[in-house]
């Protein structure tokens, strides 16, 4: 029954009651016009009030739908653009640049977030708030686990390099003595999380570097790693001795195979937990996405909304 139909029904009932009262002699026949006018005036006021309330609800529902659309944008952007970068440490700068655009705080800090989750979810979507909070917690735990794995790989790599008598000095500037680039660890981390890129290439390049401090040139042998069909290419170590450059290469390749050896139980456990957490994220994201899509298909109303009360 529509709002208009309901009001017409109430009006008819009121006039029937008036006629019955007149028939019983409780009200004089001559007073019918006055009573009828009173009933019409009362229903006009009531109908106007209800219409105003409905207009406010419709406008607020439209605002909530815009917010739901923004929530969907942030949710999908975070899942498809941010989470993959967490597993690629050599793209950390890109992560730091992109993440603010899809930060969950963009949603949580919006005033409509509290209004929607507290007043408009109803029984059907009541779990959305808990699902969203759980999802954000899972993502934070996932990132902590990734950072823990990165730290572990760094410690593991340094031990192996020290055993081989190789430098573990991390620097981007070659000055004639062996240096290790941050990508040595980052690339290992990426391969542990996502697997070794089948198109990966490692080669040793003889190069000359300028040393501003001494205004001289230094010859060096850079171990260059190329991944993802050439979309990533960078040096992972530089040595002044080609044989030591070969040692850097051999240790890097051996460390890449470490997870498949299944001998390092701690490493195996770290990677296993990350994969489990990754599956949790997939499940939570799918659940939240479905809820938001469903909610976006229907008007979003609520009787105890502060926005509606203030508007009236």
Image (cartoon, helix red, strand yellow):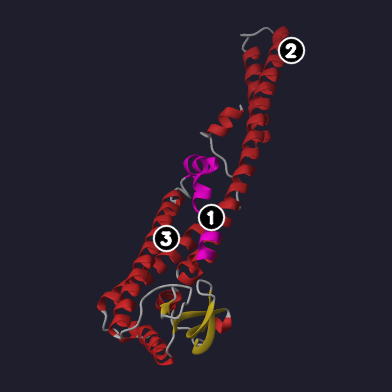
Apparent side of residue 76 relative to residue 58 in the rendered image (left or right): left
Residue 82 visible within the image? yes
Q: Which residues are magenta?
A: 93-122
Examine the rendered structure and indicate whether residue 23 appears above or below residue 62. above
Examine the rendered structure and indicate whether residue 59 appears above or below residue 47. below
Q: Nearer the viewer, residue 258 or 181?
A: 181
**How many angstroms separate mark 1 from mark 3 (CA)?**
15 Å
- Point out the image quarter for the N terminus: top right
**For the residue labelled by badge 1, is the local secondary structure a helix, a strand or a loop?**
helix
Query: What residue is shown at x 36% (from left), y 77% (from top)?
Result: 168
Q: Which residue, given by chain and number where applicable, does mark 3 sit on?
A: 139
**For the residue labelled by badge 3, is the local secondary structure a helix, a strand or a loop?**
helix
Q: x and y percent of residue 286 in the render?
A: 49, 63
Q: Nearer the viewer, residue 277 or 177?
A: 177
Name the mark nearer the viewer: 1 or 3.
1
- Point out the image quarter for the C terminus: top right
**How many angstroms separate mark 1 from mark 2 (CA)?**
68 Å
Residue 88 visible within the image? no
Apparent side of residue 18 relative to residue 189 in the rendered image (left or right): right
Please give the label number shown on residue 100. Answer: 1
Q: Main secondary structure of the magenta part?
A: helix
Apparent side of residue 149 relative to residue 92 in the rendered image (left or right): left
Q: Is residue 63 magenta?
A: no
Q: Which residue, given by chain and number where applicable, does mark 2 sit on?
A: 33
Q: Nearer the viewer, residue 100 or 283?
A: 100
């Amino acid at each position: 029954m529509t709002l208009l139909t309901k009001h017409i029904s109430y009006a008819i009932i009121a006039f029937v009651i008036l006629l019955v009262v007149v028939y019983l002699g409780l009200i004089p026949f001559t007073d019918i016009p006055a009573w009828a006018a009173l009933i019409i005036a009362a229903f006009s006021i009531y109908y106007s009030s209800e219409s105003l309330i409905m207009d406010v609800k419709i406008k607020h529902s439209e605002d909530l739908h815009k917010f739901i659309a923004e929530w969907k944008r942030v949710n999908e952007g975070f899942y498809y653009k941010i989470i993959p970068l967490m597993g690629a440490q050599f793209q950390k700068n890109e992560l730091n640049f992109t993440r603010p655009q899809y930060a969950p705080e963009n949603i949580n800090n919006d005033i409509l977030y509290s209004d929607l989750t507290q007043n408009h979810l109803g029984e059907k979507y009541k779990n959305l708030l808990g699902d969203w909070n759980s999802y954000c917690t899972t993502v934070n735990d996932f990132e902590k686990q990734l950072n823990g794995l990165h730290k572990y790989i760094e410690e593991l790599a340094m031990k192996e390099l020290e055993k081989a008598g190789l430098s573990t000095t991390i620097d981007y500037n070659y000055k004639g003595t062996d240096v290790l680039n941050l990508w040595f660890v980052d690339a290992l981390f990426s391969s542990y999380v996502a697997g070794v890129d089948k198109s990966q290439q490692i080669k040793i390049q003889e190069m000359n570097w300028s040393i501003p401090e001494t205004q001289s040139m230094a010859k060096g042998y850079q171990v260059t790693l190329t991944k993802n069909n050439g979309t990533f290419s960078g040096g992972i170590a530089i040595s002044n001795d080609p044989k030591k450059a070969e040692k850097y290469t051999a240790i890097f390749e051996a460390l890449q195979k470490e997870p498949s050896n299944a001998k390092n139980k701690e490493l195996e456990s770290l990677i296993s937990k990350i994969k489990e957490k990754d599956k949790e994220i997939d499940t939570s994201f799918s659940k939240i996405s479905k809820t938001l899509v469903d909610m976006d298909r229907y008007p979003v109303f609520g009787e105890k909304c502060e926005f509606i009360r203030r508007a009236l």
